[in-house]
Amino acid sequence: MSAAAWSALLPYLVLTGALLVLLLVVSFRRGHALAMWLTVAALVATLATLPGSNAAGAQSIDGFLTIDAFANFFNGLFVLTAIVTALLGYRYLDARASRAHREEFYILLLSATLGAMTMASAAHFAAFLLGLEIVSISLYAMIAYPEEGQAPLEAAMKYLVLSGVASTTMLFGMALVYAAVGTMAFGAVLGASSDPLLIAGQVMILAAVAFKLSLVPFHMWTPDVYQGAPAPVTGFVATVSKGGVLAVLLRYLVETDLLSHEALFLAVSLIAIVSMVVGNVLALLQDNLKRILAYSSIAHIGYLLIAVLVVSALATPAMALETGMFYLAGYFLMTLAAFGAMTVLSTGAPSDTESLAAYAGLYWRRPVLAAVLTAAALSLAGIPLTVGFIAKFYLFAAGIEAELWALLWALVIGSAIGIYYYLRIVFSMIRTPDDGAVPAASVRSIEGIAAASVLGAAIVVFGIFPTPVIDVARDAVRAFGG
C-alpha cells in the first residue's frame, strides 16, 4: 500500500493496537481504574489521528474500505461517544459488576468502536457485515454485563436472537445481490436495475437495516433492550450501533442510487412516516424513562430517514448528506446527555432510576444533572436555542427542497406529540417529590458528572452557534463528492 493509504488507516491501526495492549495489560495486571484510563487514552490518541487521516484524501483499501472525510466524520462521533461511555461506566461498574470482570468491559467497548469505524468506511458488503458483527457481538456481552438481576441477561438474549435473525436476512440478501451482479462491491450495484434477484436482495438488506435502526415494524426489541441494558450501554446502543448502520446506508445510497426504484422509495417513505408517528404515540404511554427514550429514538431515526430519502430525490445530494450528518451529530449529543444523567443518578443507587416518579424534585436534589436532562429533553423536542431545533430546521429545509410533503407533515405531527412527553420529564423534575422518589445516589461519579455537564452545555452552545459542526459536515460531504 502507498504511504497515503497507511496514513488514512492510522486511526484504525492505533485503535487496534490499543485494543491488543489493553488485552495484555488486563491479562497481567488487573485494575479497574488502569483499564478505564488506558481506554480513554487510546480513544484520545485515535481521535488525534483523524485530521492526518483526512489529509491523506480519500483512500480505497483494496476495494474493501474507503477511508475519507465522510467516514472520519462518523469515526469522530464514535470515538467521542466511546470516551463518554468509558467515563460514565467507571463508577457504574464499580457498583454493579463483579470485581473480577470489570476490565473486560473496556475491551468490549474498544472492539465495538472499531467495528463501528469499519462500517463507516465500508465499500463492500463483506466489510459492512464484518463491522456490523463486531459491534453486535460486543454489545451482546455489554448489555448483559451486570451480574445482578435478570433484566440485563433477558435484554441481551432478546437482542442476540432478534439481531441474529436480522443478520441472517441480511446475509441472504447479500447472496442474492452477488448472484445478480457477480460482486459485493457497492459501486458495482445498480439501484435502478429491474433484475428480480437484485431487487429481492436489496429488499432483504433494507429490512435487516431497518431492524438495526429499530424502525417500525422492526422495532419491537428496542424498548425491552433499552430498559434491561445498563444505562451507559443503552446510550452506546442508541447512538454508535445506529450511527454505523446509517453511515453505510448513506454511502450505499450515493454509490448505487438504490432508492431510484420507485417501489423501494415508497416503501422507505412509508416506514419513515409510520416510525415518526408510532414512535411518538407509544412514548406517550410510558412512565419508564428508558422506554420513553427508546420510543423517542424510533421517531428520531424516522426523522433521519427524510435526509436519506432526499439523497435519492435530488440530483445533487450534498445538502441531504449534510443534513443527515448534522442531525446525527445532534442526536448523538442529545441521547448521550440523557443517558449520561441517568447513569450518574443510578450509580450507587439500589436500582436504576428509570420511572418518572424517581425524578420528582431532582432540581432541588441534583440541580446540575437536572439541567443536563432538561437540555436533552428540550433538544429532543426541537425547542429553539438547542441543537435539536437546528437539526430539525435542516430537515425541513431538505424536505421542502425535495418536495416530500407527506414526510414533512409526519415530522410536524410527530414533533407536536413529542413535546408533551418531553415536557413531562421536565415537569417531573420540578414538582415536589413524593414517597416514591428515589434518593440521590450516595456514590458521586465525578467523571460522569463532568461528561454529562459537557454534553448538556454542548447542546445549548451548538444550538446557538452551530457553525463548527456544520462546517465539519460540509467539508466531509465535499470530500466525499456529494
Image: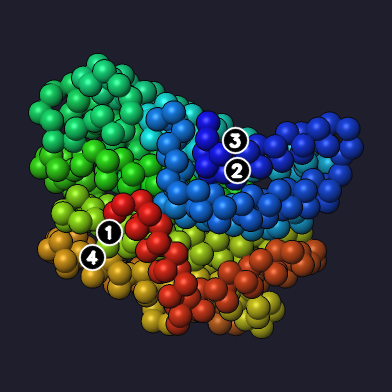
Task: Compute the Cα span from label 2 to label 4.
Answer: 34 Å
- Residue extending furthest toward the front: 2
Kind of element beneath mark 3: helix
Q: How many marks?
A: 4
Q: Is residue 143 shown to the viewer in this render?
A: no
The x and y percentages for residue 324 are 34, 58
* Quarter of the view holding residue 349: bottom right
Give the labeled residue for mark 2: 10
Q: Nearer the viewer, residue 226 or 85?
A: 85
What label sits on residue 398 in the rendered view?
4
Nearer mark to the viewer, of 2 and 1: 2
Amino acid type of the residue that numbered disc 1 sits on in the rendered structure: Ala
Task: Compute the Cα span from label 1 to label 3.
Answer: 33 Å
What label sits on residue 318 in the rendered view?
1
Nearer mark to the viewer, of 1 and 3: 1
The x and y percentages for residue 39 are 73, 48
Amino acid type of the residue that numbered disc 4 sits on in the rendered structure: Ala
Nearer mark to the viewer, of 3 and 4: 4
Amino acid type of the residue that numbered disc 3 sits on in the rendered structure: Ser
Kind of element beneath mark 2: helix
User: Which of the two labelled residues, at mark 1 and mark 3, occupies the earlier sequence position?
Assistant: 3
Q: Nearer the viewer, residue 251 or 429?
A: 251
User: Which of the two labelled residues, at mark 2 and mark 1, occupies the earlier sequence position?
Assistant: 2
Which residue is painted at 60% across and 49% down in the image? 233
Task: Compute the Cα span from label 2 to label 1.
Answer: 27 Å
Which residue is painted at 39% across and 78% down in the image? 383
Which residue is painted at 66% across and 42% down in the image? 14
Give the labeled residue for mark 3: 138
